[in-house]
Image (cartoon, rainbow, N blue to C red):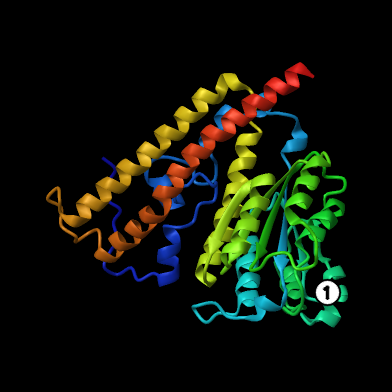
């Protein structure tokens, strides 16, 4: 079993830093960096991907570039507060800013906003519905520049989701064959007369390699249904959040899944798929054994006392486990799905 992580009585790290130890995951492999060090893995490299998808085995390099376009609803309803008292649009701005600030440097990001022009009165509908803007062009994230851009708009108008998908065609111009993703954040359904589900399908039909994820922020049943349909035809996922904390987690999860999908999507040679899955399984097993050993020791199940492994340390590790365990299980399933998708696409290429 792995040795118990020791904390000396004189160590009094900052609470945020202590919690961060168990939530940081630099290589997006679902295992906290601190635990990877304990079980002999490199927290900055995904060993399974590097081993199974080396340059000679990768698909065409054009798929290596990942581009993420956030489409943010800034309509009048986003000026309201959620159940936790947080203003919706401010919560969305903070969640997106927080995610991009910690995102990988090799990913391009863009920000499109709608509903921030005019007002939600009928007389301003034409102005608001036409006022879709790309406030942050697709490119490498600059935190300071992004914060300046985000501070410039408020939630005031209508909801032209369909036209925002149409406009995204220009955002991905020149990037059509790259690994493109749209993450839509909205608290309401289309109100400008368009059909966002058809528009999402049309975007996919334009020979643009794109996946559309949708996040419903404190939505009603009708809006949820529309956003779910958008994600379905867009080949993505639907996430739901009822408050600021939930939105932050949804954006974090959607962004993490983008990176996971991008990594496995580049793995095309089906001869290595089994090895890839086995590597993932073995690594997860090491993680679960380590956490089990530490938690058992902390609880005294195996005769250990809490002296060298404090209750606070145990609680933080358990919090990490509660977060990462379901993520690991989801990644295992996503790995399998992505592998099947890669194999199917490989077969299509062979027949062309």
Residue 7 appears anywhere in the view:
no
Position of residue 337 measured from the top left corner of the image (x, y, whole percent): 55, 34
Splitting the image into 4 quarters, where does residue 57 fall? top right
Residue depicted at x 71% and y 66%: 72
Is 37 situated left or right of 304 in this image? right
Most foreground residue, 9 or 270: 270
Classify 155 as above or below 254. Answer: below
Viewer-side residue, 266 vs 2: 266
- Please determine whether, in this image, residue 17 is positioned above or below residue 206: below
Using the image as rendered, state which of residue 145 and residue 151 is in the foreground: 151
In the image, taking residue 38 as reference, residue 185 lies left or right, namely: right
User: Can residue 207 be seen from the camera position used here?
Assistant: yes
Q: Residue furthest left?
A: 303
- Seen at 68% across and 65% down, the residue is 189
Mark 1 residue element: helix
Residue at left offset 52%, top offset 69%: 242
Pinpoint residue 310: horizontal percent, then vertical percent: 25, 63
Label 1 belongs to which residue? 128
Residue 182 lies, in percent from the top left, at: 71, 53
Within 10 Å of disc 1 (Cα), the crowding (few <14, some 14-19, many 20+) is many
Q: Quadrant of the C terminus?
A: top right
- Residue under the point 83% across and 76% down: 125
């Amino acid at each position: 079993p792995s040795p118990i992580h020791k904390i000396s009585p004189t160590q009094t790290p900052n609470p945020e830093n202590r919690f961060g130890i168990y939530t940081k995951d630099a290589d997006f492999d679902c295992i906290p960096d601190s635990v990877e060090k304990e079980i002999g893995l490199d927290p900055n490299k995904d060993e399974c991907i590097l081993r199974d998808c080396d340059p000679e085995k990768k698909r065409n390099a054009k798929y290596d570039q990942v581009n993420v376009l956030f489409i943010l609803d800034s309509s009048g309803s986003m000026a309201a507060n959620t159940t936790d008292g947080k203003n919706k649009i401010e919560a969305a701005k903070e969640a997106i800013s927080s995610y991009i600030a910690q995102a990988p440097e090799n990913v391009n990001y863009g920000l499109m906003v709608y509903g921030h022009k005019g007002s939600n009165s009928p007389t301003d509908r034409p102005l608001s519905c036409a006022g879709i803007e790309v406030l942050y062009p697709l490119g490498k994230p600059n935190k300071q520049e992004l914060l300046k851009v985000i501070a410039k708009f408020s939630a005031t108008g209508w909801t032209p989701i369909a036209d925002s998908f149409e406009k995204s065609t220009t955002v991905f111009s020149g990037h059509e064959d790259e690994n493109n993703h749209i993450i839509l954040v909205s608290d309401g359904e289309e109100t400008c007369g368009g059909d966002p589900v058809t528009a999402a399908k049309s975007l996919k039909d334009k020979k643009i390699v794109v996946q559309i994820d949708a996040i419903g922020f404190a939505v009603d049943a009708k809006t949820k249904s529309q956003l779910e349909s958008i994600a379905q035809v867009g080949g993505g996922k639907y996430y739901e959040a009822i408050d600021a904390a939930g939105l932050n987690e949804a954006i974090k999860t959607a962004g993490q899944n983008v990176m996971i999908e991008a990594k496995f999507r580049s793995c095309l040679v089906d001869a290595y798929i089994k090895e890839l899955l086995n590597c993932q399984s073995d690594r997860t097993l090491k993680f679960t054994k380590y956490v089990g050993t530490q938690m058992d020791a902390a609880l005294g199940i195996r005769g250990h006392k809490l002296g060298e492994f404090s209750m606070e340390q145990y609680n933080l590790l358990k919090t990490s486990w509660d977060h990462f365990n379901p993520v690991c299980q989801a990644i295992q399933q996503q790995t399998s799905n992505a592998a099947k998708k890669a194999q199917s696409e490989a077969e299509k290429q062979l027949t062309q």
